[in-house]
Amino acid sequence: MSEVLYRKYRPKNFNELVGQDQVKEILNKSFEKGSVSHAYIFSGSRGTGKTTSARIFAKMLNCLSESSEKPCGICQSCLAIDTSSHLDVIELDAASYRGIDEIRKIRDSAAYRPIMGRYKIYIIDEFHMLTREAFNALLKTLEEPPERVVFVLATTNIEKVPETILSRCQIFTFKTLSEEEIVLYLERIATSESFSFSKDALTRIARAARGGMRDAVNLMERVVAFTGSLDDQSVRLTLGILPDEVISSFLAAFSGVDPNRLLKVSKDILDEGLSYESLLEQSIDFLKEGYVKNMMRGNLQMISSLWEILKEMKYAEDKKAVFEVMTILKSFELTGLKEITGEILEKSDHEGTAVAKKDTQVKVEVLPRSTGGENVSRGPAEILLDHLYEKDFTLLWVLLGLSRITLSEDGESLSVDSDDGFVAKLIEEKLDMINGISTEIVGKPVSISRNKSPKALESLDKDQRAYVKNFMDVLGLSGNGALGEFKIEIEED
Ligand SMILES: Nc1ncnc2c1ncn2[C@@H]1O[C@H](COP(=O)(O)OP(=O)(O)O)[C@@H](O)[C@H]1O
Ligand SMILES: [Mg+2]
Ligand SMILES: [Zn+2]
């Protein structure tokens, strides 16, 4: 492969550009009506089509074809823009050239008439990174734009752009692409490159790319380069995605409080050269999906526990020991809830039954712990939770999800009542952040009310405690005696 795929398949016109319907429609219309602005901002995360759209628009503006179908894609101007050699279409990467000099150059050259085409078009990438002087110089140019000059300013961080600039530009927001949109595009490329592929594989790649088209294409290219094929197995291998069986086996052991099986999973992970962190991350993703589909509150409890373990793992030197101890401890905490009602469905147990036939074999459900559940406000609290989920504030989302949120009596704030020790503590730590978001989204801050209830571990029965204690001893880990507050100290060698 001589040319990287994402460049080779950069859409050459708006028909080829996937999604971004609103952007395409408005740009098309303003072009047809001849009402072209002097400055556009293309805002959106990376790999969603900003640069591509800027070039397409530049081609439309400067296309030399007589026909009304623009860009024609074959005239001298279109070809020059496709190869970045058009004298009137200038691209600047503000991430590398941040200073005033670059902008001065632009200002000076913008004063001259276009050479090859009708318009001079300046495409400035990541323009939020310009220095302050550079911004001011740019602003001056935007205040008195020369005739026939169009600025397209692209950014992944529009919140860093001063209001003075925003107010002078027409702003377009590029959306992250959906899984379906990405799969569609990957399919096109794979077909044209004669890769044999499975749809599962492409879907998995699309998911891993999290809405960015360039990442998706690059991933696909990596998979092919690495394994020579494009099936589910090769994608997993390249991305370090664990087999579903490992995830379901782990979750079954964890929610079923089965220490022996947890140790077995740990051994398998180690033997197969897989990563504990990946296991935890992918288990969290799995539960998160289940929560969104079925609103299984118990999943939140598990997510929260797994997240705690993951956090612990990041700094651990002896990952194996920490993984084993933490998963066993945290799984005992789950039974502290004593209300596990769910079933664990596994492929091996339920082969061929309707519920278990897909790759989602594990279904875990834990009922809400308290009877206060019906007080949960479905108004502002729900809006806040939705927002946290959508914006991927996973931790905050889990923390609030595990608590009771109600509108305070005076209606001035949301009151968060958490009776779980570590949840309450984490909420307190994150309160500023929660408050900021909450105030912005639902217009109310959050206040904490503490409900003193015993730590989850203290609710273990005698046998369970003895087991945990034994286990700690075997591993040579010292607890401080009180089961509720184990400190895990691993000796350095
Ligand atoms: N909406 C899209 N439709 C089709 N391909 C896209 C889209 N967005 C990005 N791409 C692919 O990703 C590559 C990079 O896109 P680009 O426009 O440079 O992204 P951005 O400037 O937003 O970071 C393109 O060459 C193309 O292969
Ligand atoms: Mg770009
Ligand atoms: Zn043309």
Image (cartoon, rainbow, N blue to C red):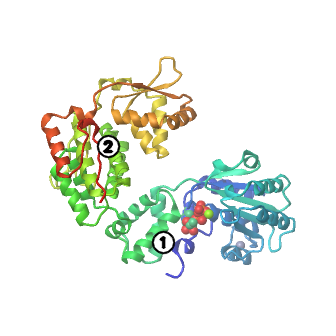
Q: Residue furthest left?
A: 463
Query: Is the CB atom of the residue marked by disc 2 within 8 angstroms of ligand 1's nearest atom?
Result: no
Q: Residue at x 30, y 24 (%)?
A: 371
Mark 1 vs ligand 1: CB below 8 Å: no
Q: Identify the residue shown where x is 32% and y is 43%.
A: 305
Contact (CB < 8 A) between labels 2 and 1? no
Which residue does the image show at 40% across and 61% down from the upper left? 203
27 vs 6, left or right, is: right
* Residue 219 % position (x, y): 45, 68
Dot 2 alpha-carbon crowd within 10 angstroms: few under 14, some 14 to 19, many 20 or more: many
Q: Which residue is mark 1?
A: 189
Question: Label 2 sits on what residue type?
Answer: Ser
The earlier-in-sequence mark between 2 and 1 is 1
Q: Secondary structure at mark 2?
A: helix
Horizontally, residue 48 falls left or right of residue 114, namely left
Q: Position of residue 245 (x, y in %)?
A: 24, 58
Residue pictured at 74% horizontal, 69% vertical: 90
Q: Position of residue 272 (x, y in %)?
A: 25, 66
The picture quadrant where one finds residue 374 is top left
Which of the 4 image quarters holds residue 263? Answer: bottom left
Write down which quadrant ligand 1 falls in: bottom right
Identify the residue position indicated by label 2 in the image. 305
Closest to the camera, between mark 2 and mark 1, is 2
